[in-house]
Image: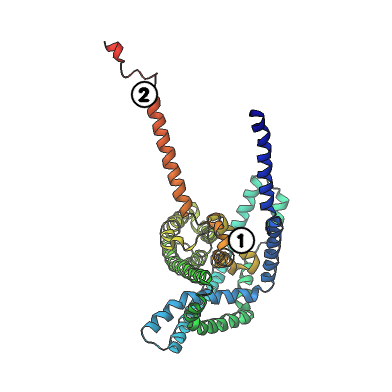
């Protein structure tokens, strides 16, 4: 009867509540939030620990990235019958030569920058005075502005550059760690294919995750290096043609900043804009902005995403946060290595754990999400067309006469 049905419904709801409570009481279910808090606390503790030994972590991880990028050269040599020891020595020699070449370019850039500051010291002072007047004109107190620029002296920048160049001797420990780890990792990499084959029957997902991580890091770093070189060369040539002082320095800066997602472009463009304003005024500044904008749009927004593809399956928000996070944890090199570091964390926590696969779309693996959105958009578009067609053929439509009227 109806009263029996009405009285049975609350019982069914009670059973559903009991089932939900039983699920919460499953092993670990009632402590899920506590586990999340524990995980966040462990992550914070790990971040502080890494920051405490950043002087070791940074060169070790940099050596790992270089070893991963150079590994195909070893495989190519061994496939052609080159002995494993000679292949290892060739890889180490190639990487060391690249590092020495880059270090020499950085030293040349520092020397040119010091000379540039000396030559344009008066212009920089005048520019600082102009900025001070502009700040006063927009309502900032004159006392604050005068105190801000009172001690401004380009000579302090020259001293800072000289201190950096002179402090290279203090990097001895970092360089020793870097080259030692590079040597040892290159030697151990000869056993890696066999080790992975041994591990695969026992931990196949871990092996797949490690292989995919190495492939993605290698693809990202090599593509970014090549495109960064192209970007730096184009900017160097363009700035030389425009007449901006220190074109080589800004080209090298553009190459370095190409490894910093999202904010690297803005870091690279500020110094050439300042010196363009000192030399040529607004016309030269606009020319610099146009050149950098076109080069950045073509290389980083068109070419790089097509070549890199899904190697970096990270959302834009996570990418930007990773740059800030790793820069704070291990210093400026953390901003350059932010993507490989974040991919390593993802590999350890998500890719190698089958229970965490559901997190991939939220981290940036959006292929399935984009296909679902495309289907949803197509369905919504078809529904709108059908609705418009129905409105056009409705009772208010007088374009066609009724049979009674024609009769």
Give the mark nearest the N terminus, 1 or 2. 1
Q: Residue at x 48, y 56 (%)?
A: 280
Quarter of the image for residue 235 reads bottom left
Q: Is residue 100 visible?
A: no
Q: Which residue is mark 2?
A: 393
Q: Nearer the viewer, residue 162 or 127?
A: 162
- Residue 1 place in picture, x, y as percent: 63, 29
- Label 2: state its secondary structure: loop
Q: Is residue 51 left or right of residue 348?
A: right
Q: Position of residue 334 (x, y in %)?
A: 59, 67
Which residue is denoted by mark 1 in the rendering? 324
Q: Are marks 1 and 2 in contact (CB under 8 Å)?
A: no
Sort mark 1 into few (<14), some (14-19) or many (20+) by Cα contacts within 10 Å: some
Q: Quadrant of residue 61?
A: bottom right
Element class at badge 1: helix
Q: Name the residue nearer the viewer: 101 or 32.
A: 32
- For residue 21, which numbered disc appears in the image? none
Query: Which quadrant: the C terminus?
Result: top left
């Amino acid at each position: 009867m109806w009263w029996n049905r009405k009285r049975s419904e609350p019982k069914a709801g009670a059973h559903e509540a009991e089932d939900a409570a039983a699920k919460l009481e499953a092993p670990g279910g009632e402590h899920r939030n506590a586990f999340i808090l524990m995980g966040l606390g462990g992550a914070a503790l790990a971040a502080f620990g890494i920051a405490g030994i950043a002087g070791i972590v940074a060169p070790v991880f940099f050596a790992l990235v270089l070893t991963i990028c150079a590994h195909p050269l070893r495989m190519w040599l061994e496939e052609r019958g080159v002995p494993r020891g000679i292949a290892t020595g060739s890889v180490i020699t190639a990487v060391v030569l690249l590092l020495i070449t880059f270090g020499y370019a950085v030293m040349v850039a520092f020397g040119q920058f010091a000379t540039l500051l000396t030559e344009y010291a008066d212009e920089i002072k005048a520019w600082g005075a102009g900025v001070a007047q502009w700040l006063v004109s927009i309502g900032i107190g004159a006392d604050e502005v005068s105190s801000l620029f009172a001690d401004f002296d380009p000579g302090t920048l020259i001293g800072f550059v000289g201190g950096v160049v002179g402090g290279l001797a203090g990097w001895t420990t970092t360089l020793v760690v870097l080259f030692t780890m590079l040597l040892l990792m290159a030697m151990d990499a000869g056993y890696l294919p066999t080790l992975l084959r041994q591990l695969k029957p026992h931990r196949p997902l871990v092996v797949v995750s490690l292989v995919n991580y190495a492939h993605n890091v290698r693809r990202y770093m090599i593509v970014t290096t090549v495109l960064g070189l192209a970007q730096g060369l184009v900017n160097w040539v363009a700035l030389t043609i425009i007449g901006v002082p220190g074109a080589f320095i800004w080209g090298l800066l553009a190459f370095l900043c190409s490894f910093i997602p999202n904010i690297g472009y803005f870091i690279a463009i500020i110094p050439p804009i300042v010196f363009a304003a000192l030399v040529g005024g607004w016309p030269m500044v606009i020319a610099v902005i146009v050149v950098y904008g076109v080069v950045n749009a073509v290389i980083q927004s068109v070419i790089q995403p097509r070549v890199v593809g899904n190697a970096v399956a990270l959302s834009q928000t996570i990418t930007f946060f990773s740059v800030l996070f790793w820069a704070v944890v291990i210093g400026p090199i953390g901003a350059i290595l932010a993507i490989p570091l974040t991919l390593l964390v993802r590999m350890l926590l998500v890719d190698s754990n089958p229970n965490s696969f559901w997190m991939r779309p939220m981290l940036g693996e959006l292929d399935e999400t984009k296909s679902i959105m495309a289907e949803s958009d197509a369905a919504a578009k078809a529904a709108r067309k059908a609705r418009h067609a129905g409105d056009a053929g409705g009772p208010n439509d007088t374009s066609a006469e009724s049979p009674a009227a024609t009769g």
